[in-house]
Image: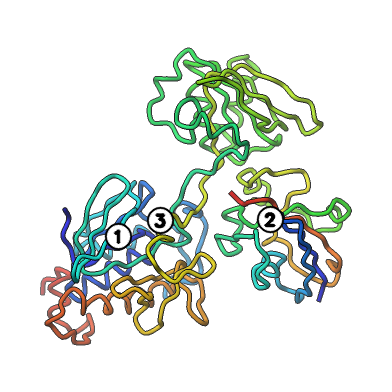
Amino acid sequence: MNKTDVLIIGAGPTGLFCAHQLGIIGLSCEIVDNLDKAGGQCIELYPDKPIYDIPAVPECTGEELTNNLLKQIKPFNVKFHLNERVEHLKKTESRWHVKTSGGVEFDVAAIVIAGGVGSFEPRKFSVKECEKFEGNSLFYSIKDKSIFKDKTISIFGGGDSALDWAIELSNTSKVNLIHRRDGFSGAEASVQKVNKLNEQGKLNLYTKYQMETVLGDKNIESVKIKHDDGEIKEIKSDYVLGFFGLIMQLGPILDWGLNIDKKTVQVNTENFESNVNGIFAIGDICSYPGKLKLILSGFHEGALAARGCFKYAKPDEKLRFEFTTTSKAAQERLGIKK
Amino acid sequence: MAKITYHTHDNKTHTIDVQNGLTVMEGAVQNDIPGIDADCGGGMACATCHVYVKEEWLDKLPAKEDGEEDMLDMAFEPKNNSRLSCQLIVSDELDGLEVNIPSKQG
């Protein structure tokens, strides 16, 4: 059981800055995120794209912003629980008992949901038959590549994951790479490599084809793919891999009794608390009249939510407003030596 | 102002006056037309505002910018007439545009 003042759900910029604001006012926190790294949409959707509207930062990328925020919260030694999704919340007297998908448990005074548009999950095939084989001979990520040795693998997708795995697995497996068009979104060098492997017969490339269906009993035996012009091919396959990027799903948050409107949590603008006492929502996932989905708004919301958490974490103390420039306590928490 | 017609997956038709300058995505979201999620808010970063454009409109729309086709690779059941509705900016020229919203976005 991890005991801390506040649990932050989501390690995007808003969650990270909220951790900073909690640290400044002397509250502890831990952060859970379903991705394998901090940064949220900034890292997952646009790590290299420039952002021009962070106050006092004329231009930075999603990755730079994330790294700077991580640097800014370093003094607080915030503990991250990555690859974990919060599943269950239970109120026990005045505190919350929280459990994640991986069985990590927390005892906290308050919860701040900074979950963006939800947790990132792999985007799946639209073909119904695929569900039956998922986790057995059809995968959206690879945990153990040794199972593919000497097998026939059909990989669908045109981005870096599809290309990289096609190249890698072509060393030890028979690989079919299937993509809906001639162009690829993956790195140019990988595209050239795939084309070369295709010419050398070390990989079979099928472009302008999409998944029609999968066939098999317990395990996949073949896949049918359909060309733009309607032609259908059946190719033998032991495994099918789909790499269509990630999609955001609100997931278990829907079950926590919060007022939800259009996939967002309704909050008040005084401290960004939801209709449930002790559960706050900030950033893209919260809504209120005038809400702007900007990172800078998320920072403001996080600062106020952090102060809102104080009364739950330290009910017998009074929070005094202070500036970091002059507050000895804040500077001590930041580890500043004079 | 342009009249945009959205055909939703439940076989309903919604014809909306959308102001010039808004996107076809915003026209749907602001009018509570179901089926367009627009998770990333119009940043061409998520493919959840994917629509099928009525064939006769395909050539009349501004060409796809770099990146839109890449994102469409990630869309739910992309076809030749697929577009991201966040990239279609409404103008008088789009008056009468019809789009079909897929059964789901992911």
The amino acid sitting under disc 2 is Leu
At x 21% / y 57%, what residue is drawn? A106
Provide the residue designation for mark 2. Answer: B84
Q: Is residue A166 left or right of residue A80?
A: right
At x 50% / y 29%, what residue is drawn? A165
**Residue A65 seen in the current view:** no
Residue situated in front as seen by the camera: A269 or A215: A215
Provide the residue designation for mark 3. Answer: A252
Mark 3, mark 2: which one is toward the viewer?
3
Q: Position of residue A160 (x, y in %)?
A: 53, 38
Residue A255 numbered tag = none
The amino acid sitting under disc 3 is Pro
Q: Are marks 3 and 2 in contact (CB under 8 Å)?
A: no
Q: Earlier in the sequence, mark 3 or mark 1?
A: 1
Label 1 resides on the chain identified as A
Q: Position of residue A251 (x, y in %)?
A: 44, 54
Asked if badge 3 and badge 1 are on a common chain, one would say: yes
Provide the residue designation for mark 1. Answer: A89
